[in-house]
Structure formats: structure tokens, C-alpha cells
Image (cartoon, rainbow, N blue to C red):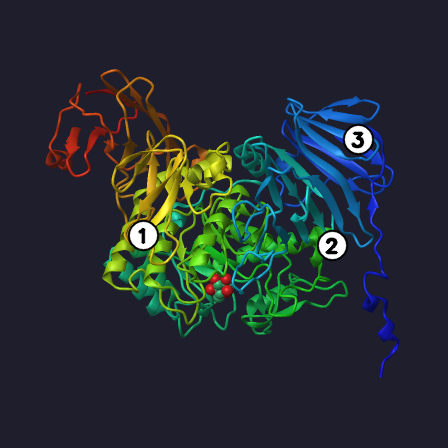
Amino acid sequence: MDTSEAIHPDRIGAEVVRQAWGQIGKALSLTCIDGVYICRGERASLAFVFLSDTMFRMKLFMGKDVDLSSTIAVLPREQSKLEATLQESESAWTLSSGQLVLEIEKKTSALSIFDVNERLVARQDQISWNPRGAIQAVYDMPGDSHFYGLGEKASFLDKKGEHYTMWNTDVYAPHVPEIEALYQSIPLLIHMHGRSSYGIFLDNPGRTDFDMRSHGIAYTIGCSTGDYDIYFVYGPQLKDVVREYTKLTGRIALPPKWALGYHQSRYSYMDQNEVLNLARTFREKEIPCDVIYLDIHYMDEYRVFTFDPVRFPDPEGMMAELKSLGIRIVPIVDPGVKKDPKYEVYRQGIANNHFSRKLEGDLFFGDVWPGISAFPDFTDDSASEWWGNLHKYYTELGIAGIWNDMNEPAVFNASKTMDLDVMHSNNGNPKTHEELHNLYGMLMSKATYEGLKNNLDGERPFVLTRAGYSGIQRYAAVWTGDNRSFWEHMALAMPMVLNMGLSGLAFAGPDIGGFAHHTSAELLVRWTQMGVLFPYCRNHSAIATLRQEPWSFGPEIESILREYIGLRYRWMPHLYNLFQEASETGLPPMRPLLLEYQDDPNVTNLCDQFLVGRDVLAAPIYRPDTEHRAVYLPEGEWIDYWTGEVIAGNRHILAHAPLRIMPLYIKSGAVIAEGVPTLYADDRTDETITLRIYGAQAKKGFKASYSLYEDDSSSFAYEQGASSLLQFELIGEDHGLQLQYRYERQGYQANREFLRFTLVCTSFKLAQIEGLNELTIEEAEEGQEGWYFDEQTGGFTLQVQDRSEGATYFLKG
Ligand code: GLC
């Protein structure tokens, strides 16, 4: 029988319970108090703070005072206030910084942003809010608009016509374009139109929303709780947006070199013997590998900070053998702590009030791998410190890397996460889980990174995370969660990781070979060829799927995989250089062509090929039974890495790529630093460097240059100046080339006697170098200084003593 509930207003729906949306109305005044420009409107106010010539913050607030604290996404040092020039006309106020002019219309409170040439860059029409706390702002969307950023999203590079939500979510269902929220939330939208770009970062870790689909000539940004608090980051170059945004939210910490190696994982390597056999097999087969991951089965009934005593009876012994092989272990650590009164971690968490609770005081319990579990409240510094210190358990075993998973947090319940009414302590400023949801994973990885760092005696930690929020790049690398062994998912990894790179997540990659479903020999080859050029390079697969270690499909496949993994290791000095650049500038090692060729209309949505740094172009084959594909080469000359053919750019070509070949091109005039082949990345027994110069020309106007950064690959000594920077230049003259190198600083002494400079794919015929003898290859191998020609590669190599004072040579043709 029905009760009165039958006529509950919610059952009747929105037609009856209509929500009243409010708007600012007229702008009434604009004043400046301590560097904060306050625009009072009829029904709400806007606060503006200029952070640089090209960046300002804008926050909507009700009432008298504005709270300008921010989330941990924003680095405190980036919050200083610059002065702007304030002017008033009859219809508007304007605020000018060096590069931008903001105009606030008195009649509507609409905001127009102009560049120094009075060109309209962006326009924010209205901000509206409803009584339940949702806020939405509307922005102009001209017809030539393109959208990028937004972190980890499915679909193509250009997000025009898409709608996305930021709500960290554990998505095991196949990742498809219509999934609006995955594990990471990076609420940074980059808008490009008229070949100029700007970004809007909405610093709100609750549910936020970006709609470039539904409003025709406008796009909207909104949030369902919390504040509308944005940072407007002007380009006009995309690179400027990435640099400024990462200045605000931080850049990747320089990783230990081993973290850039090839990583092998599976859910799960079940016991100690399996792990050791795996490591031995890598070494027997001479396939480079730096890390083996331990997935959840290493634990005692999934209790974090334990080893299963039967499967892993001797972790110390295992670690000792792995160390002798140059292989590291990265174990998984999830946030759920098993509810078990006999379990020390649970007891400590309860005794010290470190777990998340409801307002009423009840602990929040959720079901995850260990069964019913409690979840640390990482918004509380003391809980984070406790968690960080628990990692001593691993560091004492020689473990320096941790894999954070399920930290959205994922819970096996209907909402897939923690109850929204959990009240996080937030260091004395309590907020609901609904308001802070997207911060949970980042705070866990921050606690982990800091805990490891405190306990590693000067070694650089490595953290891998599934969930994160803006700024996560400061603490962890990111992998793209549970993809599948589908060709479509291989293709999807490119735009996904490219946009992550534009969103500050420079150190990212997918599970190579695919996690769920079953890989095939061909898919594994094609995916590995591509994956070895991604920033993060891990092969991982799910329980009960076909094995996908490099030797799983016989010797022919194994040899191709060895070659490509080997290429990553040969290019390690170059890759490390790119990571160092990312840590200083925010520019990602893996780049869409758009980042380097913003004015080229062919690349606005090009995402089935990518650049490694500025000059290496990879065009993977991402379909089965396919040996040909179209490749777009931007302006300039490009050299086919495999054949040495020089190809004019600014056009599409058809590449031929049998299974052994992934189309790969190097820009003419580029330089790549190569190391000697090693089986693990921080093997420093021989740090001889070869600078390989592509397409040198003995004519005026030709110039190739390179800056090589080096340090001890693993400690923080570089922060105290223990790094070196080698500057190299090759300049074309009428009858030859002038080659010069010098150390700009040499705070790190690499372990080598020689530097090598190799000229490949060049029409230049070297005849003589004053002060250097011509050698046979045998003489060079014996360790003499001089130069030689290698018939096999068709290249000339100078092998010279590595002198701290540098040297100059004239190469006569
Ligand atoms: C999640 C992770 C996956 C891991 C599995 C078991 O699905 O995304 O990488 O292997 O849990 O821990």
C-alpha cells in the first residue's frame, strides 16, 4: 500500500522543483585591496589576482570577504600578486597586465580578455549558480576552436564536440570515447582559436564539468560543489600555456634513471620463485629491464605493508639476488587497510585516528581486495606522515618505488567510491568527500613520495599512481589504468598520453600490450614498438590473460621486442635529457606535432603519430595485418631512421612498415645523444656518449646543436650542483664543418674516457681533421683518439678524449 511518499516532490521531478539560477547582474564597483582586485556585482563578486604578465586568477564569491586560499595543486610560491593598471570608462573597467587586458562590462559583469594588439582572446559571458551550489560559466567558442588538455580522457586529441566530467573513477569497463571520467582529474582546458591559445584551470577537486558540445557557439565550465576559482593562462603559444600552467602546479620531479627503463608487470607474479625466474630470464635473454612489479598477491591476504609468508618467504634473499641482476622491485600499495584487529597497520590507524570518518564519528568502511577496509584520511597531515613512514617497511628491503592503485579511491559498491558524506579533517578545515574527492589519490601519492624520500637516504623515490589531480606530476608518474588488449586501445593511448603531457603529466604511459583481454604476437610487437617511445614504459597484463612477457610468442617476436627495448636504452641519455627538460620547463618528452608546429593546420588533431622531444617523429602501425600507413611530415627535411632516406616535409607520405619496422623519422640537423647498450638504465660502468648528428651539411647557414645534461642518475646531489651540462655545436662552413664542445658546468664527472660524434645521413665527405688521425675501426675499438669511417652505417665518427676544457675541430671535406 502506498504511503504519502508516493507524492514525494522528487518523484514529480524537475518540472515542479525548478531550480532558481542566480547571476552576478550588474558590476557596481572595482577596487584594489592588497593586490586583489574586487569587482562587486549586484548579487555576487569577482576577485582578480594577477600572477604574471600572462596569468590571472579569478574567483567568484558571495558575501563580503573572499577566501584566497587554494588547494595543494597550486604551489604556494606561485601565489604572489602583481599590480595591474586599472582604468574606468562609462561602460567598463579594464585591468591591464603586461600582455593582457581584462575588460569587465558594467552592465552584465561579462569579462573580455584582449591581447596587446586588442585582439579578443577569450570572453566569459555569464556565471550562474543554483541554490544547491552548482556553478557554471559560459565562454565564447568561435568556429575555428580546438580544445586540448583535460588530462586523461579517451577519444581524439582535439576535444571539440566533447563533454567531460572530472570525477576520479575506477573504470574497468572498456575505455571508450563516451566515458567522461577516468582515474585522473586535471581540470585544465586549453582553447586554441586563430592559432593562439589560452588555458583555464578550474581549481576545484569536487565534481567539475567541461562541455564543448551542447551550446553551439559557447562552451561551459562548471562545478557541482565548492568554488568557481579559475586560473586564466594565456599563450599565445601552446608551449607557453604548458610552461605557465606547470609553473603554477609544479613540474615532474627528476626521476631516477631506472624509472625510465623498461618495466615488466603482471597481475600477478605469484611467488618469489616466479619473480626470480623472470629476472633471470631477462638477463639470460639479454633483454633490458629495470623493474619487476609485485601486484596484490605478494601481500598476506592483501594487507598492505606485508609479504605473504608462503609465497614470499624470503623477501631479503629475493631482493639481494635481484640487486645483483640490476633489477628493482616496485610493489603495489592500495589505500584500503583490512579491518582486522590483529593487523598492526589497522590497529595503529584506529589508535591514532588516521582513518576517514563520517561527521557523526563512524568510520567509513568499504569493500576492496582485502574485504572490509578502512581508508586513511590523507587530508590530515598526521595521517599522511604516518602512512609515509610505514614505507620504511619497503625501503629497509632496498625498495625505492611504490605503485599506488585503487586510490580514486575505488570501492566495490554502487557509487564505486567513498561515501560522499565522509567528513575529511582537512587539517582543521573539515570538508566532505564530495568536495575533496579528486584530491584523494594525489594526497596518497604525496604521502608516499614524501615517506619514501624521508627514508631513502638521499635516493630519488619513484611513485606510480592511477588516480590524481592537478599537480600530481610533482609526486608520481601516471599510468592510464585498465585498458584492454585491443588495437583500438593501442591507438587511443596516443591522444590520451599526448593530452596528459599538455596537462602537466609529462611522465605517463599505458599498459603496453593491454591489461585486460588477450594480446597477440602482432599486437604486442606493434604496441611495444610504440610504447618504448612513451615517457612511461611498462608491460602489464591481467590475471587469466595470455602471457605477454617479451618471449611469450617465440624467438622471432622476442628478437623484435629486444631490438626496440634496446633502442629505448640506447637513447636513454637523450630520454633522460628530455625528462630533465620536463622537470625544468614542464614540456613533455612525448609531444603532439601541434606543440612544435602550432601554425600547421594539418596537425590540429593529428594523434596517430607523435614526437619524442622536438626532432624524433614516430608513426606506429596500430592496425592488424597492416604494412603501410600514411605519415605526415611537417616542414623541413626528415630522415627515415631505418633507411637513411632524406624526405622533404610539409606533405603526407606512404610509409612501408613490415612487422619489424615502426616508421620513425629524425629531423635533418637534429642531434641525439646515445649511450652504450646496457641491460639496466643506471648501469654506469661505461658512460661513453655518442652524439649522433643527422644530415649535416658543409655549407653556411647549417647549424646543429645539443645540450646534454648528466648527473649520477639516482640521488638528489644534482640539487647541490652535482650535474654537468655539455654544449655541442656543429656549424657549416664553405669547405667543411666546425665542431665544438664545451662544458658549461661539470659538477658531475661521467665515467668515460671518450666522447664520440657521429655524422650520419650526410652528403658531406670527411677528408681530414687537423690534429686528429684517421683510424681503422679496429684502431678505434682499441681506444685510440682519431676519426674513422664506418662503411656499414655510412657515418663518420670522431672519437676524442673527453676534456673538461672542451675542444674545437675543423672537419675538412
Ligand atoms: C587494478 C589495477 C591493475 C591491477 C589490479 C590488481 O585493476 O588497475 O593494474 O593489476 O587492480 O591489483
Q: Pick whichever, 115 or 543, lies toward us.
A: 115
Name which of mark 3 and mark 2 comes first in the sequence: 3
180 sits left or right of 728 in the view: right
731 left or right of 54 in image: left
Identify residue for label 2.
430
Please tell me in which quadrant of the rendered image residue 360 appears. bottom right
Q: How crowded is mark 2: few (under 14 residues within 10 Å), some or many (20 or more)?
A: some
Residue at 39 percent of width and 59 percent of height = 513
Q: How many labels does the image show?
A: 3
Task: Tell me the residue that label 1 is attached to.
Answer: 627
* Distance from Cα at disc 2 to Cα at disc 1: 58 Å
Which of the pair 7/558 is nearer the observer? 7
Crowd tier of the residue under label 3, counting other residues whose Cα lies within 10 Å: few below 14, some 14–19, many 20 or above: some
Looking at the rendering, in which quadrant would you find the N terminus?
Answer: bottom right
Relative height, residue 802 to residue 425 (above, below):
above
Farthest residue in the top direction?
Answer: 734
- Sequence order check, earlier mark of 2 and 1: 2
Q: Is the CB of mark 1 within 8 Å of ligand 1?
A: no
Q: Is residue 653 above or below residue 155?
A: above
Label 1 – label 3 distance at C-alpha: 58 Å
Q: How far apart are marks 3 and 2 (CA)?
A: 37 Å
Which sits earlier in the primary sequence, circle 1 or circle 3? 3
Q: Residue at coordinates 11% horizontally, 37% vertically from top-left?
A: 778
The tag on residue 105 is 3
Q: Where is residue 29 in the image (x, y as percent from the top left)?
A: 85, 30
Quarter occupied by residue 590: top left
Picture coordinates of residue 779, whole percent (x, y): 11, 34
Mark in the foreground, 1 or 3: 1
